Amino acid sequence: MTAVVAATLTAAALAVAAPAAAQPAPSADGSYLERSEDNSPRQRTLHVYSASMSRVIPVAVLLPRDTRTPRPVLYLLAGAGGGDGGTLTWLDRTDVADFFADKDVNVVLPLEGAFSYYTDWKQDDPVLGRNRWTTFLTRELPPIVNAALGTTGANAIAGLSMSGTSVLSLAQSAPGLYRGVGAFSGCAQTSTRPGRTYVELVVEVRGGGDTDNMWGPEGDPAWVANDPYVNAEKLRGTQIYLSNGTGLPGPYDRLDHPNVAGDPANLAEQVVVGGIIEAATNECTHLLARRLAELGIPATVDFRPVGTHSWGYWQEDLHRAWPMLGSAIGA
C-alpha cells in the first residue's frame, strides 16, 4: 500500500419479533444463551451472553432448509461496521437469505464488533469498549450455537474487508475449528508499516478507537501474532478461498444498483474511494496467495478483473466460494 493510497483511504471512511421461549445453555466459561427470538420461520436471533466481554451479543441465524437432522455451520462476519445497529450486514446488503434458502446449513451472523477486527484487545478502549472477539468466536459462541441449533459441529467462516483479515487470523488461532475459510477483499498483512496503516485507518480514523489498546504500540509482538501473512503456515489443512477485485468499475458500480440507490454521491464514493481501497486489498491478496503457494498450501484464488470495495462483489464472492466452503463442512 503506497502512501498515496493510505492518504486517500483516510477519506473513506432485524426486525425484532416477540421472544420465543428458550432455556439458557451455560458453558464452562460462564457464557450462555440468554434468549432466542424467532423472527420468521427461517430466521432467528440468539442473544448470547459473553463472559469475556461481560455483555449480551445478538447473533442472527439463518436456519437450514431441513432441520430434522444436524447440519453444519457457516459463520459470516461483517465488515468494518460490524453489523452494529443492523446496517451494513450480509442480511441488509446481499441476497444471503434467499441464497441459503435451499441449502442445509446454519448461517450464523454476529451483529456487533464494529471496528474491532474481531480480535482480542489488550485492554478496554474508551470509544470501542471491551473487545474479546477471538475468545467469543472460537470458544464461547460455537458450543452455544451447537447446542441451540443441534449442529454437526463442522464449521466454516467467511468475511469481507476488515473481517477478510479476521477470518484468516481466527482460523489460525483455533486450528481445526473451521474446516473452510473465505476471505473477500481483505488485507492479510498487519505487522508491516503499510499493513498497520490499513488497520489504523479502520480502527482509528473510521472507528475512533486506539490501536494501542488493540495490539499495543508499534513493535508489540501482538501485531505479528495476529498477522495472517506471517502465520500462514497455520492455515495448512484448512480449505481456503481468497478473492479480490482490481478496483476498476464493474457491473455493480451503477446508479441503478440497490446498494447505490440512484444516488450519484453514493456511486462516486463507491467508484473512487471503493476503487482505491479495493486496489490496496488486491495487492495484499496477491501477496498472501504467493505466500501460500511458496508454502505449498492449496488455496482457491479468484482475482476479478474489475470490482470496487462494495457489497455487490462480495455477494458474488460468497456465491462462488460456497461450493468449496459447503464441501468442506459437508453441506
Image: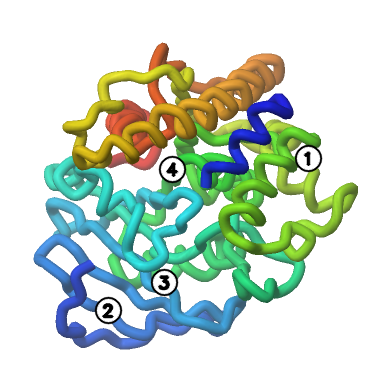
Quote the CA–CA distance across marks 1 and 4: 22 Å
Q: Secondary structure at mark 2?
A: strand
N-terminal-most mark, 1 or 4:
4
- The quadrant in which the N terminus is found is top right
The label shown at residue 36 is 2
Quote the CA–CA distance across marks 4 and 3: 19 Å
Q: Residues within 10 Å of mark 4 (few under 14, many from 20)?
A: many
Mark 1 sits on what residue? Answer: 191
Q: Is residue 118 visible?
A: no
Q: Given the image, on which type of amino acid does mark 1 rest? A: Ser
The label shown at residue 144 is 3
Give how far across and how far down residue 49 sits, in percent: 46, 81
Residue drawn at 72 percent across, 62 percent down = 210
Whether tag 4 and tag 3 are in contact, CB under 8 A, the answer is no
Q: Secondary structure at mark 4?
A: strand
Give how far across and how far down residue 43 sits, in percent: 19, 63
In the image shown, does 175 or 44 lie closer to the viewer? 44
Give how far across and how far down residue 263 sits, in percent: 25, 40
Residue drawn at 78 percent across, 40 percent down = 191
Q: Is residue 203 visible?
A: yes
Residue furthest toward the front?
264
- The quadrant in which the C terminus is found is top left
Q: Residues within 10 Å of mark 3 (few under 14, many from 20)?
A: many
Q: Residues within 10 Å of mark 1 (few under 14, many from 20)?
A: many
Q: Given the image, on which type of amino acid does mark 2 rest? A: Ser
Q: Residues within 10 Å of mark 2 (few under 14, many from 20)?
A: many
In the image shown, does 157 or 315 lie closer to the viewer? 315
Quote the CA–CA distance across marks 1 and 3: 33 Å
